[in-house]
Image: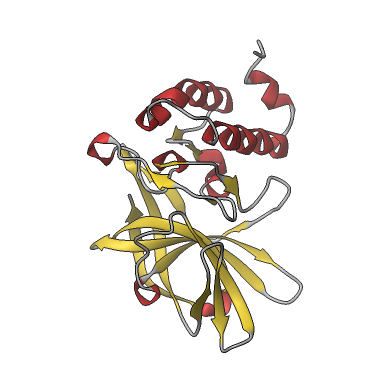
Amino acid sequence: MDPQFPNRLLRAGPGRILEFIQGLFRDFSQLHLTNATDKSVAFSGLESRITEALKTKSIYGIPERFIHHTLLWQRPEGGKLNRIEYDNNSVPSWSWMACSGPIEFAISWGTEIERRTNLSFEGNQKHALSAAEVASFMDCELKGGEKTEVLKKGRKEIVGRIRYDRLDDIPEFNVQRCIVVGRIDGAKEKKYYVLVVSRISKHEYTRIGIGEIESSYLSRIEGNVRVI
């Protein structure tokens, strides 16, 4: 109901803009639409006004200006997401609009991340997210239950965590791959935030969740891939 929406955002600074965008996406994800497949259309009006004001591109709820933060959406711990069966699979797996159910973000507006991988929308291909490289998990194993999967080295040392978007149809851990989105340097280790992906064809992957892991447990295996 704000007559100055969204221009008022531009006076608030980048941090507040991202805070508003993440809050808007969280709130919208909790709405109960009569038809789940109306989700992308229902949001398109808000999205176009925001991106026009910010002078950026936004595709299916991921603004390019804040691509590294907004790609790291996730289901709340203990929450549940279901894949929406759009016609012709029109909404890509990396968009929160691909699922029904509430979301949150792994990294809030107050946390600075060092961007580690070149991520961009691929020309006019609205469904494709281009990434400079994909990596595999190494020297660790997956343990845990349905809430948050734990990545361990040996029996005791926790080196990372994965939160899958959906709890059904998760591929075996040894074939899962990841795309590094950003890095946060802690006091003891460098931690990477990643998109967890599954390969569907040569150089193409689909998102299955997000994770965080210490940098020494990733190994680059392929460059120039697409997430669809």
At horizontal 53% and vertical 30% (from top left) the residue drawn is 31
At horizontal 40% and vertical 64% (from top left) the residue drawn is 133
Query: Is residue 54 positioned above or below 182 on the image?
Result: above
Q: Is residue 6 left or right of residue 220?
A: right
Q: Is residue 156 left or right of residue 120?
A: right
Residue toward you, 35 or 197: 35
Q: Position of residue 100 (x, y in %)?
A: 44, 40
Query: Is residue 4 positioned above or below 61 on the image?
Result: above
Residue toward you, 70 or 146: 146
Q: Position of residue 55 (x, y in %)?
A: 54, 28
Numbered circles on residues, count: 0
Q: Position of residue 135 (x, y in %)?
A: 42, 70
Q: Residue at the right extreme?
A: 187
Q: On the rendered image, what quadrant is the N terminus found in?
A: top right
At horizontal 71% and vertical 40% (from top left) the residue drawn is 15
Q: Is residue 186 left or right of residue 39?
A: right
Residue toward you, 28 or 225: 28
At horizontal 60% and vertical 33% (from top left) the residue drawn is 27
Query: Is residue 39 positioned above or below 77 on the image?
Result: above
Image color mode: secondary structure
Residue 213 visible within the image? no
